[in-house]
Image (cartoon, helix red, strand yellow):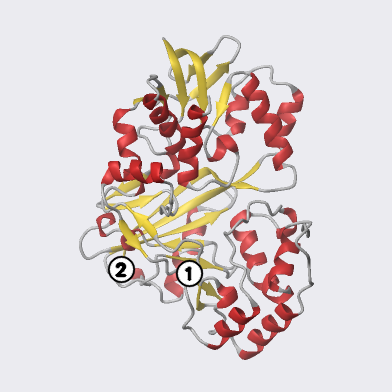
Amino acid sequence: MKVDNLILGAGIAGLGAAYALRKVGQTALVVEKDATYGGLCGNIEIDGFRFDRFVHFTFTQNEEVNAIFKASCGELIRHIPNPYNIYHRQWIKHPAQNNLFPLSADEKESIIRDFKARPVVDALYVPKNYEEWLRVQFGNYFAEHFPMVYTKKYWMRDARDLRTEWVGNRVYQPSLDEVIVGSQTTDTPITYYAKEMRYPQKGGYKALLKSMADVANVEYAMCVKEICPREKKVWFANGREIEYEKLYSSLPLPVVIESIKNVPEVVRDAVSQLECTSGYHISVALKTKNIPPYLWWYIYDEDILAARVYSPSLKSPDNVPEGCSSLQMEVYCNENEYTEQGLIDRTVGKLVEMGIIKQEDILFTHIGFEKYANVIFSEPIYKARKIVRDWLKKQGIETIGRFGEWDYLWSDQSLLSGIHIIYSD
């Protein structure tokens, strides 16, 4: 079988590439190892409960992306962000740095004192690493007790081992006045980087991809076994063989390199330096609607494995049966680092212990694993990924999406990654 354009992966980037090819009058075949489209934007359905694969919202302002999403599922549910944190078993409004009110007087004094004592840096200042950036932004006490602790839970690395280019507007940097006011009152403005979060009324986050998937030519259960750029052929685990004119891949860069024979040592060495987190999502179905009213919350306490918790039922009531609710916790760790019971005990069990949910209200729990969760911005990332992507491009393989670009892309950025690679050809 021969095709003009072959796209590896039917996640949001792969479907975006197929969408863009269609717009310019070209055909494409999308191949996907799973039984359905979506990738990390997909979901799991059990007994009337729907759980996304990690937390997902859209807050994009891009007109083309919003048009695709609207064509997929009409008007979206609009949420005003209300994230919270758990810190030493206390609920603290997010971001914590300018919402210190629940803390003790001594702790607030320590944070504000260190915030005032931050070093003065000029516009040309370039931090050595993320830890130094945190200390400069927030002072030593807050940096050490809040983001540096969370960094180890979320990124599986010490802050000193991370670069800072990924930060952007993801971490709010308050003024001294904001810190002081937030230590005196809970009446503070929303300072989250997105002022509105949107989500499909029905079908989960995956529903945003429907208009692209409906017109794409997708074949499922197609797991890549070998790629031969010289012959322009891909072999699959099911015995299929496809020849192509152009190849687009949204697969993780290590997966692509592993599938190609005779890769230069310098490229193999570079791909070995690319790091990412793996993650478990622990989903909880509840026969009550009595859950915290927050769409999502972060957990700083180290004895609780989950870094983040969100509620699918608050995102959309369509995600649960009538009268029920749901939560999902994200744990970032190495595969098999914990037993299933260990994961449950230190996630769901901790919520029960804290009185956030009741054991008798739990209908079931589910554990899902994602080998590729987030790209880690360790020191060699930029040089290493350039070596890998440049070599693949020379072999006629265009790489797209979060793990094809090997970048911290939100879902709309991943979609545009697929679209733009076609428009730029």
* Residue furthest bottom in the image: 105
Q: Residue at x 52, y 73 (%)?
A: 86
In this view, 70 is above or below 383: below
Residue carrying label 1: 350
Q: Residue at x 64, y 48 (%)?
A: 376
Q: Residue at x 64, y 54 (%)?
A: 156
Q: Of helix, strand and loop, which one carries label 2?
A: helix
Name which of mark 2 and mark 1 comes first in the sequence: 1
User: x and y percent of residue 231 in the render?
Assistant: 57, 9
User: x and y percent of residue 411 in the render?
Assistant: 46, 45
In this view, 194 is above or below 189: above
Q: Residues within 10 Å of mark 2 (few under 14, many from 20)?
A: some
Q: Is residue 162 left or right of residue 21?
A: right
Q: Is residue 252 left or right of residue 17?
A: right
Residue 145, quarter of picture: bottom right
Q: Is residue 149 left or right of residue 21?
A: right
Residue carrying label 2: 361
- The amino acid on which the numbered mark 1 sits, given as a three-letter code, is Lys
- The amino acid on which the numbered mark 2 sits, given as a three-letter code, is Asp
Q: Nearer the viewer, residue 43 or 294?
A: 294
* Residue furthest left in the image: 322
Residue 285 visible at all: no
Residue 65, quarter of picture: top left
Q: Residues within 10 Å of mark 1 (few under 14, many from 20)?
A: some
Q: Is residue 341 left or right of residue 124?
A: left
User: x and y percent of residue 20 in the render?
Assistant: 41, 29
Residue 337 visible at all: yes
What's the distance in space between the residues labelled 2 and 1, CA to CA? Answer: 15 Å
Which quadrant: the N terminus? top left
